[in-house]
Amino acid sequence: MTTKSDQTSTHLPDRILVLGATGTIGRATTAALVRRGYDVTCVVRPSFDPKDACTDLTGAAIMHADVTDPASLRNAVLAASPFDALVSCLASRNGAPQDAWAIDHQATVQAIKVAKAAGVKHFVLLSAICVQKPRLAFQHAKLAAEQALVASGLTYSIVRPTAYFKSLAGQISRVQQGKPYLLFGDGVLTACTPISDRDLGEYLASCLSNPALKNRILPIGGPGPALTPRTQGEHLFSLLGCPAKFKHVPVGMMRGIAGMLNAASRVAPSLSAKAEFARIGLYYATESMLAIDPDTGRYDRDATPSTGQDTLFDYYSAVINGEATVERGDHSVF
């Protein structure tokens, strides 16, 4: 005979709250959490349409709230609590200073406060590997949010991924049109170990169950060797079966443009966003998306952990064959 105590002792799946669930990483993370058997609730903007095929969140409950409105988020979360953990995939749309401080910092810090008030024990934060050398507004905003989480007293996992596949796929259509592949400088100034949405989603989900990933800052990349932009271009031409054709953009020219816009923005504040975008382009043209070896102070593939099975070139093939689409939104350089 089953007693009442036997029934109440049955373990229920952990309840997980996901912020930023409608973005590509948020969707992949939600899917990974659902596959692992968690009870998942996604916070989405009030205007979210659940019938939108591009933002499929099958298997998860939906909660409407405005993450930029502290009262909206607090009322929604506290009304539905308790949650065991919160996974934040919030990210500003394009890195503009105002948007970065509103989302990457303010909304994230507010989520940390709400989580703590609601009794959440573990907070998983999607950050970025580039905050290890912060020069841009969104990097400073993310780094400040990381510091707020560490100081909050919550168990935390701060995940700093390297480059995303979508951010390295912007030139596929360009090359298909017969145009040259753009390289900054000689094309080997930087390198990265890109990671797919799916592999990153699985890694974020694994932070909830793997004790080794708790109370740590976690740089993470995908499988394989570090890839330079020139290597990426050469492989793309190979997949398309056409001879490689490159156009080199001098880094000095980019520095000059960024410098002029920065100076002009001091006189005309309306140019500040353009100046920041120029600085963002210059940063990614000159800095690798790899972990920095603390002993040498240099970017190092061996110091960059990796996970997953998906490769960038498999993704290139899928896009070329029409099996995948490049969802880049505002994250565009070219």
Image (tube, grey):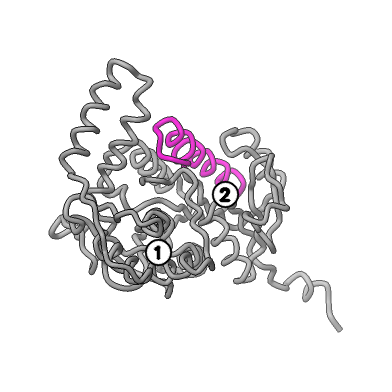
- In percent of width and height, residue 19 lies at 57, 49
- In percent of width and height, residue 324 lies at 52, 64
Label 2: how many Cα within 10 Å (few below 14, some 14–19, many 20+):
many
Q: Secondary structure at mark 2?
A: strand
User: In the displayed structure, would residue 46 be above or below residue 184?
Assistant: above
Going by the numbered disc 2, the residue's amino acid type is: Leu
User: In the displayed structure, would residue 310 be above or below residue 97?
Assistant: below
- In percent of width and height, residue 222 lies at 37, 68
Residue positioned most to the top? 267
Seen in the image, is 6 located left or right of residue 267? right
Going by the numbered disc 1, the residue's amino acid type is: Ile
Seen in the image, is 89 located left or right of residue 177? right
Q: Is residue 186 magenta?
A: no
Mark whose residue sits in front, 1 or 2: 1
In the rendered image, which residue does mark 2 sit on?
Answer: 19
Q: Which quadrant of the structure image shows residue 31?
A: bottom right
Image quadrant holding the N terminus, namely bottom right
Depth check: give the residue in front, 176 or 66.
176
How far is the residue under mark 1 from the one under mark 2?
Answer: 20 Å
Q: Which quadrant of the structure image shows residue 291?
A: bottom left
Label 1: how many Cα within 10 Å (few below 14, some 14–19, many 20+):
many
Magenta range: 92-119
Q: Which mark is residue 195?
A: 1
Depth check: give the residue in front, 87 or 161.
161
Seen in the image, is 260 located left or right of residue 121? left
* Residue at horizontal 62 percent and vertical 46 percent from the top: 118
* Residue at horizontal 54 percent and vertical 68 percent from the top: 323
